[in-house]
Amino acid sequence: MDLGLKNRVAIVTGASKGIGAACAEILAAEGAKVVLVARTPRYLDALAKRLAKRYRTEVGFIAADMSQRGSADHIAKQVVRTFGRIDILINSAGSSQGGLFWEVSDDTWDSALQLKFLGAVRMVRAVLPTMRRQKYGRIVNVAGNTGRQPHPRLLPGATTNAALLSFTKGLSEEIMKYGIYINALQPGPTQTEHWGTLMASLSRGTGMTPKAFEKEFMKEIPMRRVAAAIEMARPVIFMASDLASYMTGRSIIVDGGWTKDLA
Ligand SMILES: NC(=O)c1ccc[n+]([C@@H]2O[C@H](COP(=O)([O-])OP(=O)(O)OC[C@H]3O[C@@H](n4cnc5c(N)ncnc54)[C@H](OP(=O)(O)O)[C@@H]3O)[C@@H](O)[C@H]2O)c1
């Protein structure tokens, strides 16, 4: 099936690892021109080179901290200067911490909001002038199923995800008339560095190792396993492609059956 992604210009934030890297790989495999964004240049450089060589497409990178004001405008300007357009934006940068509510510091709350919520909001704002001019754009925000089903030990991430879902829905109608669609993914547990850090922090003080804690956690997940990043990337790419031509302001929950509500 042709996803219509060949020669599309895509920006992926949080692209050096995990879900973002898996999204970048599918985009490159489909012939899109991809710009990877994260903070650490050596991971970005290695991934950009590997994808460009393997899929014979243009893959560049911009090292930037998405929690900083000014990063989003800088990225959008650079991409337009290089490729002349921006067709797809995937916001996957995020790394909020969990813990007992009364032990979570202001800094943890602040960094969750600055990176995942405001980082995505600013990035969307930065690409809109180009997408509006083109009368075409596809935006996918990687939120999290805790945005709908908050977990008591994951509140900074959960409330940030809820804000991102509200933003996604609220903006969708405004930009639809320019041919710009915006949707979100709500992943459940996914085997990435972020997940490893979460298990380590949540298991602290429980007397369990992170592995034993994860095993206990899995009892809540009907499929009894953590997803692979590629299992999240596939629905993201569906929403970024022309296959999702009648979909905006919505989200897809991919959580091994975890979320307890009607679809
Ligand atoms: N894994 C899960 O179980 C799960 C579940 C629900 C939702 N999610 C969400 O999915 C998204 C992706 O998570 P993941 O699991 O794929 O995480 P990951 O494997 O840890 O990757 C995070 C990516 O974001 C980048 N990043 C982190 N801080 C950044 C910053 N300040 N500025 C720019 N880039 C930054 C990282 O690179 P650098 O560190 O080099 O910057 C890396 O490329 C996150 O928003 C996460 O909340 C994940």
Image: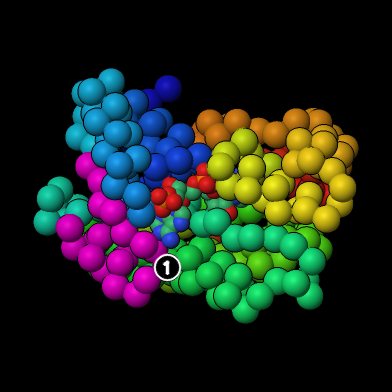
> Residue 19 placed where, x, y %?
51, 41
Which of the 4 quarters of the picture holds residue 9?
A: top left
Of residue 248 and residue 224, the one placed in the foreground of this image is: 224
Residue 159 covered by magenta stretch = no
Q: Quadrant of the N terminus?
A: top left
The magenta segment is 60-78
Who's the residue at 22% across and 42% down the image? 60
Amino acid carrying label 1: it is Ser
Q: Nearer the viewer, residue 122 or 110?
A: 110
Image side of residue 158 versus residue 26, left or right = right
Say whether residue 165 is left or right of residue 224. left
Outermost residue toward the bottom in this view: 106
Residue 167 in sight in this render: no
Relative side of 173 to 49, left or right? right
**Residue at horizontal 29 percent and vertical 27 percent from the top:** 50
* Residue at the spot of label 1: 67
Please provide percent x and percent y for residue 209: 79, 40
Look at 29% across and 73% down and name the residue there: 70
Distance from mark 1 CB to nearest ligand 1 atom below 8 Å: yes
Disc 1 secondary structure class: loop
Position above or below: 154 against 52: below
